[in-house]
Amino acid sequence: MQFDDDANLDTSEVQDVRGSRIPGGRATVGGGLAGLIALLLGLFFGVGPDNLGLSSGSDSPVATASSLAQVQSTCRTGQDANTKEDCRIVAVVNSVQDFWTQEFERRSGTYTRSPTVFFSGQVATACGTATSAVGPFYCPGDRKVYLDLGFFDELRTKFGSSGGQFAQAYVVAHEYGHHVQDLMGTLGRSQDGRTGANSNAVKVELQADCYAGVWAHHATTTKDESTGRPLITSLTDADIQDGLDAAAAVGDDRIQERFQGRVTPESWTHGSAAQRQQWFYQGYRTGDMAQCNTFR
């Protein structure tokens, strides 16, 4: 995956609170047993911690001056995105939101842009206070995506993904798939409390995978408003394979087999490895969000 070296990155779409502290230090999901439970529940790439009844504390993180300035000062161009991980995520966020803005306009709708919050350790959100153990998530309460960049190392070391830059892009695009669902009014279908291979919770997650694939289909043709050229200039078959590999690595069956030694489909919340791959590729192959109706 390559970015246009001369493109200007919009860092306003990322809020960097790494190194911050939360007043009171409250956090509901952490290491040890709680973190393991989070893994077994397959929370990764999901909707925010409110689904688990986490702490409803709304204290905002207090960022240090260095964390507030880090992304803004170092992530300026596509060249930065080609060499630095956090800048690459900024560029992916820009590309994903450029696509959905244009897609909503094409459908006579309005897309509301949503920031991604970089955090480390723990973070307070409108959905509750959570730690990195929850994995990347979207909070519909404040319409923000939350991401600890350390998760990308865990995706490879704990979950067996091959890694790669596009694996990271897939994670980000999946979370913005939840934002699209939120704007379209379909996200609430996952809130009925049911689990299982045919539950609405799984269908919502698979649709977000499909939406990630739709963006990937258009990634190299979506024009950046500042340059009139695509921000992403190259996306290879190997990149897409990295995305498919990441999708499989976080399938409920793979996670359950790895961490509890058995597969229990009745407790699935995100879908199997095969399902996640299938729906990501469906979106990538067709480039049409109308082909992402997992509820059918």
Image (tube, helix red, strand yellow):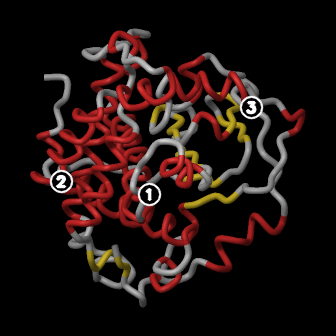
Q: Is residue 186 visible?
A: no
**Mark number for residue 168?**
1
Say whether residue 293 is left or right of residue 28. left
Note whether 90 is above or below 40 in the view shown: below
Spot the residue most to the front: 261
Give the residue drawn at x 29%, y 77%: 230
10 Å neighbourhood of mark 2: few (<14), some, or many (≥20)?
Answer: many
In the rendered structure, which amino acid carries the disc numbered 2?
Tyr
**Mark number for residue 112?**
none
In the rendered structure, which amino acid carries the disc numbered 3?
Ser
* Distance from Cα at disc 1 to Cα at disc 3: 28 Å
Give the residue drawn at x 23%, y 45%: 280
Q: Is residue 205 visible?
A: yes
Residue 29 at what x, y percent from top left? 69, 27
User: Which residue bears the numbered disc 3?
Assistant: 58
Residue 275 at what x, y percent from top left? 23, 33
> Do the numbered discs 1 and 3 sit on residues whose CB atoms are within 8 Å?
no
